[in-house]
Amino acid sequence: MDRFIIEGGRPLEGRVRVSGAKNAALPIIASTILTGGTSVLMDVPRLRDVKTMGRLITNMGGTFEHSGNTLSVSTEGLSLFEAPYDLVRTMRASVLVLGPLTARYGTARVSLPGGCAIGARPINLHLMGLAKMGADITLEAGYVIARARRLRGAQIYFDIPTVTGTENLMMAAALASGTTRLENAACEPEVVDLGEALTRMGARISGLGTPVIEIEGVEELRPVEYRVIPDRIEAGTFIAAAGITGGRVRIENVIPDHLEAVIMKLQETGISISVDEEGILVEGPERPRSSDLKTLPYPGFPTDMQAQFMALLSVARGTSIIRETIFENRFMHVAELRRMGADISIEGSTATVRGVETLKGAPVMATDLRASASLVLAALRAEGRTQINRIYHIDRGYEEIEKKLRGLGALITREREEP
């Protein structure tokens, strides 16, 4: 396994380009199952999770060629309609093939994803929706088996907004007979991007970006050429990185509208953020101010930015309160930030962050994707040397992050951990 070595205390300066959004690319890749033929997707980041989705497609009989940031994927020759445990356990998004396989081939066998480091995320809403659309759902030896001659339109209400549930059922509904109405659907930009890609394929979808999405099923979909949206969480992470180091960074390839809640909250801490035709210009203060935070579904403050925001607040003037409402176990980075001198206490789903003047470099361990990013941010601010172990987590969601940070003047190196 690899680790990062970071020498902190240097303000970030320069320009950085945000990669395509992993959380948009993965469902769009899964949606190509609905088409057959060859689709070309642009601005697809070269990440561990994308490679895993490629293994899944090729395991089923398709082809998957990633050249630069352009992906060519063909699902014409699929013959095995299964997502096996050894792939699903490494990437929960593998469950996104359930809807497309059932809709196009009438059968799917997908391993239950189970929980993950940030808490249990069951797929009961996915299964409820498919059952309402006429699928016969059985559970067998840790696998979901779905069968249907042809799915039919249905009215489906989500008890809570679910991103992957909305995406799975939206894809399934695209080839169903009749009209499907998804109520209390997720509104995230990644869901909208999938809907836009499906529309280019020939799907009939209305209500994208709202809690009510309607899909009128069609007989077939066609392959597509499509560019994935920029990654709003990567963009938010670089805004926070510039802020925590007191740097000056221009962020390119970004959609500011996707970051409204993040920008407003970071501005509360004293970070100067301005938007123009070139992107976002960020100027960090000598030391940020405290600010309270509550994570919420989009368009609220994203849970995927909570850890990075906490790292920033750990060196802020004053005391901040963070409430995590999305995942029940998303404070695992707190123990590692404390190793660096942060003063943070937790009670249930609430963290109290008492800002300290400085953090100190220390050996720490990444526990999940966004926790990894928070430790990188803390290390960039800290005095001395920080060693971040188990960085394979960060490789799941940030494309060449150390290269991008070095381009901004950070002293960061990747090295192989000793056995």
Image (cartoon, rainbow, N blue to C red):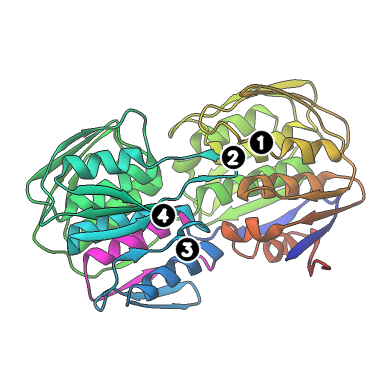
Mark closest to the chain's N terminus, 1 or 4: 4
Mark closest to the chain's N terminus, 3 or 1: 3
Q: Secondary structure at mark 1?
A: helix
Q: Quadrant of residue 155?
A: top left
Name the residue beneath numbered marker 4.
24
Query: Is the Cβ of the residue at disc 2 closer than 8 Å to that at disc 4?
Result: no
> How much space separates mark 1 and mark 4, taking CA atoms?
22 Å
Name the residue beneath numbered marker 1.
309
At label 1, which amino acid type do we have?
Answer: Phe
Magenta extent: 21-46
Mark 2 vs mark 3: give the one in front: 3
In the figure, is residue 223 to the left or right of 178? right
User: Residue 79: x percent and y percent?
Assistant: 26, 75
Q: Is residue 346 above or below residue 132?
A: above
Q: Secondary structure at mark 3?
A: helix
Name the residue beneath numbered marker 2.
305
The 10 Å Cα crowd at callout 3, few under 14, some 14 to 19, many 20 or more, is some
The 10 Å Cα crowd at callout 1, few under 14, some 14 to 19, many 20 or more, is many
Mark closest to the chain's N terminus, 3 or 4: 4
> Which residue is drawn at the image coordinates 73% and 59% (left, top)?
408
